[in-house]
Image: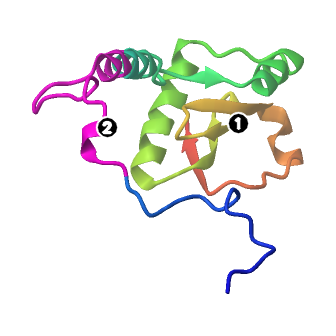
């Protein structure tokens, strides 16, 4: 006996399955073909990747904080100082340094080694007064 509360209109008829004849094959790709969408996507991704590689870190970068500290402490980075810091970065990379202290004859620098970035700078006269935290390595470059 059928349940009088069940209405046949609310229950879908699942006994019939659509045949393959109803499938639209106009958008199907033949073997070896690529879609126009995939070509556009690949072109866009290639251009973005080439833009990223052209912006890869080359040389040293200064954080906003480091620029402010250099101005406040009347420090400048000349060619010789630049070469020392860059050389220190290379050595620190080889040893696995991440956040490091680079001490030169002129100043001390906290650097982010993977990003080739000077995070902050301390003049030579103030080095003894500071506590350096969150560093994993130190290098002296005189």
SS at circle 1: strand
Which residue corresponds to the image point at 13% horizontal and 29% vertical from the top-left? 30
Tell me the magenta residue range. Answer: 18-43
Asked whether 25 or 119 is in front, the reply is: 25
In x, y percent, where is residue 56? 45, 23
| Other-residue count near label 1 (Cα within 10 Å), few / some / many at <14 / 14–19 / ≥20 | many
| Other-residue count near label 2 (Cα within 10 Å), few / some / many at <14 / 14–19 / ≥20 | few
Q: Is residue 77 left or right of residue 67?
A: left
SS at circle 2: helix
Where is mark 2, residue-wise? 22
Name the residue furthest bottom: 1
User: Is 4 drawn above or below residue 93 in the view shown?
Assistant: below
52 within the magenta span: no
User: Is 80 drawn above or below residue 131 in the view shown?
Assistant: above
User: Is 115 drawn above or below residue 61 in the view shown?
Assistant: below
23 within the magenta span: yes
Where is mark 1, residue-wise? 108
In x, y percent, where is residue 85? 54, 30
Which one is in front in this view, the residue at disc 2 or the one at disc 1? 2
Asked whether 44 or 114 is in front, the reply is: 44
Quadrant of the rendered structure where residue 141 is? Answer: top right
Which residue corresponds to the image point at 23% horizontal and 29% vertical from the top-left? 28
Q: What colouring style does the render use?
A: rainbow
Q: Point out the image quarter for the C terminus.
A: top right
Disc 2 versus disc 1: distance between alpha carbons? Answer: 75 Å
Asked whether 116 or 29 is in front, the reply is: 29
Which residue corresponds to the image point at 75% horizontal and 31% vertical from the top-left? 121
In x, y percent, where is residue 6? 75, 71
State the mark number for residue 10.
none
Q: Pick whichever of labels 2 and 1 is earlier in the sequence.
A: 2
Name the residue furthest left: 32
Name the residue furthest front: 1
């Amino acid at each position: 006996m059928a349940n009088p509360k069940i209405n046949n209109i609310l229950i879908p008829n699942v006994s019939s399955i659509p045949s393959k004849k109803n499938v639209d094959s106009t958008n199907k790709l033949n073997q070896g073909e690529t879609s126009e969408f995939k070509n556009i996507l690949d072109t866009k991704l290639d251009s973005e990747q080439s833009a990223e590689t052209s912006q890869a870190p080359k040389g040293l970068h200064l954080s906003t904080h480091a620029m402010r500290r250099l101005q406040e402490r009347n420090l400048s980075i000349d060619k010789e100082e630049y070469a020392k810091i860059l050389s220190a970065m290379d050595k620190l990379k080889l040893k696995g340094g991440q956040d490091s202290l680079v001490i030169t004859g002129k100043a001390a620098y906290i650097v982010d080694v993977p990003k080739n970035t000077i995070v902050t700078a301390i003049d030579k006269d103030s080095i003894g007064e500071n506590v350096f935290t969150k560093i994993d390595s130190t290098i002296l470059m005189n």
